[in-house]
Image (spheres, grey):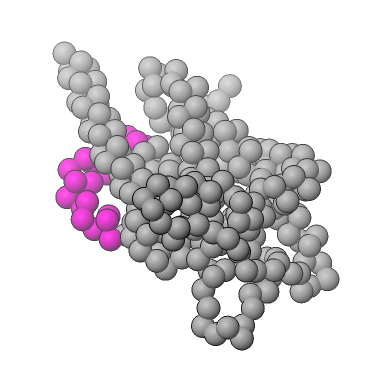
Amino acid sequence: MAKNLGEMSFLDHLEELRWLLIRSTIAILICGAVAFFFSDFIFDQIIFGPKNPNFVTYRFFCELSQKFGMDSLCVTEIPIRIQSREMGGQFSAHMWTSITAGFIIGFPFILWEFWKFISPALYSNEKKYAKLFIVIASLLFFVGVLFGYYLIAPLSVNFLANYQVSKEIFNDIDLSSYISLMRSSTVASGLLFELPVLIYFLTKFGLVTPQFLRTYRKYTLVIVLILSAIITPPDILSQVIVAIPIMILYEISILISAMVVKKQIETTDIVKK
């Protein structure tokens, strides 16, 4: 039987954390092993999808611009070639892409392990929301991954592929560089979309308050724009597209933080009575 929070020593916490990391790593490796055998689909259809001018995102923006009598957003060519310049380049890309896929697929299990780790610090009536937590947090992560894949990744690929300092230069892109862009665009977006969940627990443990979040809203906007600039190409349109959902999530996080504080006050009043 697991010890209660008050009965656990610092070493007990470290032991629990160690097993959390071990079980999570095993889950990622198992999911990654499954993904390893679907390399044709993962690489040809998913990884290299945004390299295709007929990618769904490009078609959407093209049709949207045509409705306004323009063709400026239509993509006719992605002028890059992917190459591997190292002997083990393709094998390494296969391995790390499989592990990344394993992390994405196994994310709900990682969340479950995280919930078990922090649940001793929660009230008994809060522990029953484990399934709801897993569903909401997983949904936010997967929505973020899809957002990164269908918006950030193609915008980045199209912008960087067509950016030229001279017509004498052709973009022969190294395989690891291309996959790194895809990985950062998708996984980073998925983790950013976990902001409401993070704020919930930070508020729960008294590390942030809704007043704090409202006070520093303007500074958060600057941080969001910096993050948008890091994970997107350096054009204003891409940064705005990324910044808008993050700021919406931030406002939702403020509401969640306020709800947590209100619930804590009500619980304290009941205990006093």
Q: Quadrant of the C terminus?
A: top left
Image check: 51 left or right of 230? right
Q: In which quarter of the image is the N terminus?
A: top right
Image check: 210 left or right of 167? left
- Residue 182 lies in magenta, yes or no? no
In percent of the image, x 24 and y 58: which residue is there?
219
Residue 180 makes an appearance in the image: no
* Closest to the observer, 27 or 124: 27
Question: Tag count in the figure?
Answer: 0
Where residue 130 appears, as percent x and y from the top left, is 48, 23
From which residue to which does the magenta span run? 199-222
In percent of the image, x 60 and y 33: which residue is there?
109
Where residue 55 appears, as percent x and y from the top left, is 59, 50
In percent of the image, x 42 and y 68: which residue is there?
234
- Vertical placement of 227 versus 174: above or below? above
- Residue 215 lies in magenta, yes or no? yes
Image check: 77 left or right of 220? right
Where residue 95 appears, as percent x and y from the top left, is 75, 54
